[in-house]
Amino acid sequence: MRKVAALAAVVTMSLGTLTACSGGDYCSELQNYAEAVKNLDIKDTAAVDKMREEAKKLSKSAPDDLKDDWKIVLDYSEKASEAKGDTGKLSELAKNDGEKIAAASQAIAKHAKDTCKVDIDG
């Protein structure tokens, strides 16, 4: 359970509340994604599905250097959704994919700040 909370915190902290984005569809869509991940409860399958839908949109408009990072986010969200809130499965997901999702989240967050002038709270 602790790992699930830690992984949810990584996702929320890394991609959390985004503000004031400038330019481009990608930057505008980041704001929608931010709402989907704000206070995300990884055990809430509907919330994870909403986040995944926003991530799908972003993955299509993302800069080439972030495509792999968005694929990691999409793969993670798919697995989280398939876990259907099962804390054992989510703990295993955190164990197996925690480092990858954290690194991808950090890369996305850095680009959001540097390119879209987006500040990430957390």
Image (spheres, helix red, strand yellow):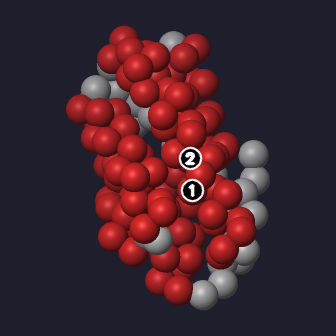
Q: Is residue 18 left or right of residue 51?
A: right
Q: Residue at x 58, y 14 (%)?
A: 2
Q: Position of residue 6 (x, y in %)?
A: 60, 25
Nearer to me, 28 or 100: 100
Which residue is pictured at 66% across the width and 74% down the height?
Answer: 115
Residue at screen point 63% across, 56% down: 109
On screen, residue 46 above or below 58: above
Q: Secondary structure at mark 1?
A: helix
Residue situated furthest bottom in the rendering? 23
Measured from the top left, where is residue 37 in percent x and y?
Answer: 52, 51
> According to the image, label 2 marks what residue?
105
Amino acid under label 1?
Answer: Ile
Q: Secondary structure at mark 2?
A: helix
Where's residue 38, x and y in %? 58, 52
**Residue 93 visible in rendering:** yes
Decide: few, some or many residues near mark 2? Use Cα within 10 Å; few <14, some 14-19, many ≥20: many
Residue named by callout 1: 108
Q: Which residue type does callout 2 highlight? A: Ser
